[in-house]
Amino acid sequence: MIRLSNVGKSYRTRSGIVQVLDGVNMTVSPGERLGILGRNGSGKSTLIRLISGAERPTCGTVERQMSVSWPLAFGGAFQGSLTGLDNLRFICRIYDVDPEEKVSFVQDFSELGLYLNEPVKSYSSGMRARLAFAISMVVEFDCFLIDEIVAVGDARFHDKCNYELFERRGDRAMIIVSHFPEYIRLHCTRAAVLLKGGLVHTASIDDAFAIYDEERAFAA
C-alpha cells in the first residue's frame, strides 16, 4: 500500500514561496490503478516525484509498503558520464538484480544499438527515456509510476511499452498521469483530479473527467 497523509510541497523562488501541493491525501492498494488528471502546472509531476521518493514533501507523510518505481521515462537518476550499460549495471546492483541476465533485454528493448556503450550525457531525451523505460522493466516493482509514458517513441515503441507494462505486469499497482482521456479510461480503475493544490477523489472516472473538463473550461 502507498499512503499520502496531508502532503504539501512548496518551493522557494525569487518571488517568494510557491505552494504547489497542499493537504494531499491518497491511498493506493496492491493491484489498483489510479489515474491523476490536472492542468499543466497543477503539480502532477511533482506528486509523482514525491511518491517515488525523488523529492521529499515539505510537510505530511508518504508511506510506501510496496516497492515503487521511479517515474517511467524519467532519466534523471542516470550518471551522465557512464555508458548506458554501466548505468544498467549500477541500478541493478542497487535493486539486487543480476545485471548480466538483463543486458540482452535492455539491448533489444531500448533499440539503442552501439549507443549503449556511449556515455548517457551524449543521448537525446528520447534515447534516455527509452533506456529508463527498459531498465524499469528489469526491476519487478510492486507499483509503477507512469508520467506520460505514451509520449516516448513511435507507435511501434508505444505498443512494446504497453505490452511490457499493462499485459505482462497487469497485476501491479500503477499511478498514471496523462492528458489523454482514452489512456486513463483504458488503463485505470479510478481517477482523481489535482485542483488548487489538492487531490479531489471521485466516485467514477467519468466524474473525474467532468471536474477536469470544467476546470479547463473555466481556465480558458
Image: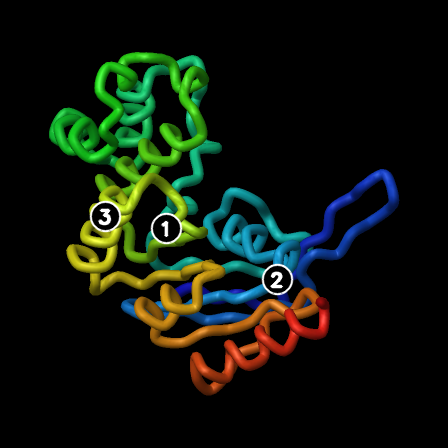
Looking at the image, residue 88 lies above or below residue 3: above
Q: Residue at x 32, y 30 (%)?
A: 91
What residue did someone put label 1 on? 150
What residue did someone put label 2 on? 39
Q: Residue at x 24, y 35 (%)?
A: 96
Mark 3, mark 1: which one is toward the viewer? 1
60 left or right of 3 in image: right
In the image, farthest residue toward the bottom: 203
Q: Marks 1 and 2: CB-CB under 8 Å? A: no
In the image, farthest residue toward the right: 15
Which quadrant would the N terminus be assigned to in this image?
Answer: bottom left
Q: What scheme was used to colour the molecule?
A: rainbow
120 left or right of 55 in image: left
Can you tell which mark lies on residue 219?
none
Q: Residue at x 19, y 53 (%)?
A: 163
Q: Considering only order in the chain, which callout, 2 or 1, is on the residue closer to the N terminus?
A: 2
Real-space CA distance between mark 3 and mark 2, rounded to the nearest whole angstrom: 31 Å
Q: Amino acid at mark 1?
A: Val
Real-space CA distance between mark 3 and mark 1, rounded to the nearest whole angstrom: 20 Å
* Residue 4 coordinates in the image, percent (x, y): 53, 65
What residue did someone put label 3 on? 140
Q: Residue at x 13, y 28 (%)?
A: 104
179 left or right of 85 in image: right
